[in-house]
Image (spheres, grey):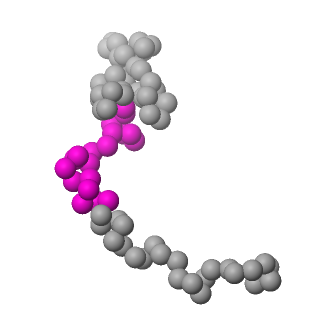
Amino acid sequence: MAPRHQGIQRVEWDWCDRCGFEFPVTSLVLQKGLKVCTLYCYDKTLVEERPQIIAAVLEDDSETVDDERLIESDDEVRFS
């Protein structure tokens, strides 16, 4: 923990355990035993909502690849 001075106030800084960036201690929170920053790493998803979110992502077929786009052999690869 490295103290820094911002004007006349002393501000304590520490490292985020997840992303590794340095933040003021006031913007770090404990989550799952780690000190994580509220800017990038804090998971705001409630534990109760996670199964529904995962199920919704898995049901979405828009990410599936159709067979026409798959390359079956090296002969089909052409560079323009």
Q: Residue 53's quadrant in the figure?
A: bottom left
Look at the image and tell me whether residue 61 can be seen.
Answer: yes
Magenta run includes residue 52:
yes
Q: Residue furthest left?
A: 48
Q: Residue 59 at x, y = what percent?
A: 33, 71
What is the x, y in percent for residue 15? 44, 24
Residue at position x 30%, y 66% in the image: 56
Q: Residue furthest bottom?
A: 68
Q: In this view, does 19 lie above or below 79?
A: above
Q: In which quarter of the image is residue 36?
A: top left
Q: Is 39 within the magenta?
A: yes
Asked whether, in this view, residue 26 is left or right of residue 17, the answer is: left
Residue at figure coordinates x 26%, y 53% from the top left = 50
Image quadrant in which you'd find residue 80:
bottom right
* Residue 24 vertical position relative to residue 52 in the rendered view, above or below: above
Instruction: Please name whichever residue, 8 or 80, is drawn nearer the observer in this view of the structure.
Output: 80
Q: Name the foreground residue: 61 vs 2.
A: 61
Residue 2: where, in percent of width, then height? 44, 13
Residue for point 36% across, 73% down: 60
In the image, is residue 57 above or below residue 29?
A: below
- What quarter of the picture does the N terminus occupy? top left
For the record, the magenta segment spans 36-54
69 lies left or right of 51:
right
Q: How many marks?
A: 0
Residue 27 locus on image (x, y percent): 32, 29
Q: In this view, does 51 lie above or below 63?
A: above
Can the viewer see residue 77?
Answer: no
